[in-house]
Image: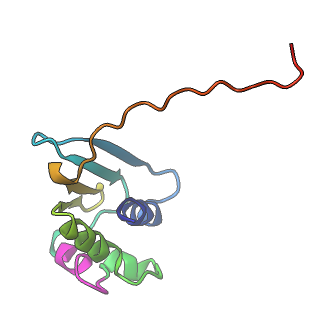
Amino acid sequence: QITLNLLSNSIKFTPSGGEVRVRVGWTAGGGQYVSVKDNGPGIPEEEIPVVLSAFGQGSIAIKSAEQGTGLGLPIVQGLLAMHGGTFELHSKLREGTEAIAIFPLSRVMEELPALPTKTVATRGRR
């Protein structure tokens, strides 16, 4: 849900021909992160608290008549808080936005062993 909300926002506000990049990786403390970065219109610095509040929409969303509820980023924040994670939102007007969901080591699964390969029987074929 976190990744879906972040991707949805980036795609919604990035103009045609723009770019949305998704990165995943490890933090220095052994946690993991998901970053969604776009080169859309960006968010004015003074509006970042507004877009992070429930039902808040920035001026660009209002001007472009985007029909969102203003709950996407607050949901992301709430889900990350439930997992002991953090959320960062970096944006520059006319340059784009980067949203980063950071999960602590305690929420990272251990590596699973490889699945054994199964032999597929072929009936009547030689």
Give me the residue at 21% from left, 70% from top: 82
Looking at this view, name the residue that lies furthest to the bottom.
Answer: 55
Residue 56 lies, in percent from the top left, at 28, 84
Front one among 26 and 73: 26
Residue 57 is left or right of residue 11, and the answer is left
91 with respect to 13 (left or right):
left
Residue drawn at (60%, 27%) of the image: 118
Residue drawn at the location 28% of the way across and 46% of the way down? 109
The quarter of the rendered structure image containing the N terminus is bottom left
Q: In this view, does 120 lie to the left or right of 110?
A: right
Q: Where does the C terminus fall, quadrant-wise?
A: top right
Q: In front here: 65 or 7?
A: 7
Residue at the left extreme, as displayed: 29
Which span is picked out in magenta?
47-56
Q: Quarter of the image holding residue 77?
A: bottom left
In the rendering, at what x and y percent does residue 59 appear? 31, 79
116 displayed left or right of 109? right
Question: x, y (%) of residue 10?
Answer: 40, 61
Work out whether 11 lies above or below 64: above
Q: Relative to 109, does residue 98 appear above or below in the rendering?
A: below
